[in-house]
Image (tube, grey):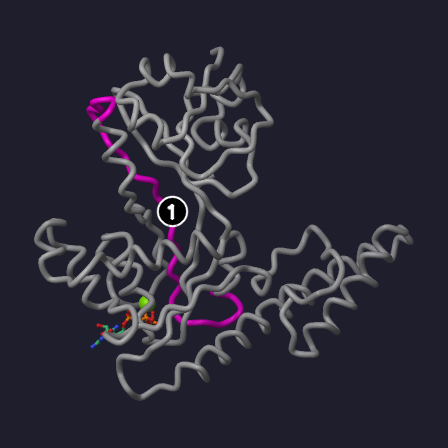
Amino acid sequence: MAVEVGIVGLQNAGKTTLFNALTQVGAGVSGKEHVGMAPIADDRLPQLAEVVKAKKITPAAIRVVDVPGTGAQLLGNLRQVDALLAVLDIWSGTRDPAADLETLRLELLVADRDHVERRLERVQKQAKSGDAGLRAEVAELERVLTHLDGGRPLSEYETALPPELEPLTTKPLVEIRNGPAGVDVKLEAELAELPPEEASEFREGPSALEDVARRVFEAAGLLTFFTAGEKETRAWTLQRGRSALEAAASIHSDIAQGFIRAEVIRWEDLVAAGSHAEAAKRGLQRLEGKTYVVEDGDVLNIRFNV
Ligand SMILES: Nc1nc2c(ncn2[C@@H]2O[C@H](COP(=O)(O)OP(=O)(O)OP(=O)(O)O)[C@@H](O)[C@H]2O)c(=O)[nH]1
Ligand SMILES: [Mg+2]
């Protein structure tokens, strides 16, 4: 499953413009939900590709969901995402971004309240059968509801939440101040339509979107690992703390199914050695099992049975 982020913001904040800048999809500016893949720029990838003389280079990509406006129903479409991007208008000069952020947080809270209330109603009905587990869940959901009524996000809930809930207010939230003084989303959306070399001539430094991606990685606890093959050299996104087996599953379920071992080498070691063979000769390559915890910058070669 690809890592997923959802874009939230008040009306006209620039959500769809940010979606277009990230995904280069060129979505129509208003109306419906948009879903697309955003490639993640990474300097390490071309260096690895050069070492193995890769015929194809594929950057990591995260799935981006843009919902129009707010409201509990629309925000409900974001329950599966790993992080939220909150777009705040600082470009028009007519908004107070701090107040808008508060409004947005409240919208998320209200959406969670709706979500919990609906679940509570359902479980209350089922609990009439007298099942002790269901009655305990009713009591727990009532506590969750009281917590939300106190105006506090579920990230501040003291004990474990019922596992069936998919709250929004526990998700990491990355603020994007949209405007020339912050992230110039409109400019980036326009530049996204140009070839990369032309686009970089318009900018002072790196794309502001690289910083957005970095903050998403930070907030959502993500890392990048690589596969470096001659046919294809590729970057992948994974949650921190995940195992080699889970990394394999994110590539393909067959690879996870037939997992034997993972050959692991640090990306900088592979680049310094100049080839897989030389890296192996220098003893820079390790063999790891299913439970090995993948680190940012690992190059994995997963051995598997079909
Ligand atoms: N000048 C300027 N205009 C912007 C900027 N960001 C967005 N806009 C304009 O604001 C309008 C709304 O932008 P959208 O990206 O559609 O906003 P949205 O948040 O998706 O709006 P809804 O989906 O309707 O809630 C468009 O006309 C954009 O061109 C900006 O940084 N500068
Ligand atoms: Mg929009």
Q: Between 90 and 137, which is closer to the camera in this rendering? A: 90
Up/down of 226 relative to 72, above or below? above
Q: Is residue 188 above or below residue 223?
A: below
Q: Position of residue 180 (x, y in %)?
A: 23, 74
Query: Where residue 15 appears, x then y in whole percent?
Result: 33, 67
Query: In terms of image quarters, where does ligand 1 lie?
Result: bottom left
Please name whichever residue, 115 or 129, is drawn nearer the observer in this view of the structure.
115
Query: Residue most toward the front?
Result: 282
Quarter of the view holding residue 276: top left
Q: Quick check: 178 above or below 283?
A: below
Q: Nearer the viewer, residue 267 or 258?
A: 267
Q: Is residue 70 magenta?
A: yes
* Residue 265, magenta (yes or no): no
Element assignment for label 1: strand
**Residue at x-position 27% and y-position 61%:** 208
Left or right, 187 with respect to 163, comes to left
What is the magenta range?
Answer: 51-74
Circle 1 residues within 10 Å: few <14, some 14–19, many ≥20: many
Give left or right: position of 288 versus 197. Answer: right
**Residue placed at 20% from the left, 22% from the top?**
53
Residue drawn at (41%, 58%), measured in percent from left and top? 215
Place of residue 73 in the rendered image (x, y in percent of width and height, measured from the top left): 51, 66
Identified by mark 1, the residue type is Ile
Residue 60 figure quarter: top left
Residue located beneath label 1 in the image: 62
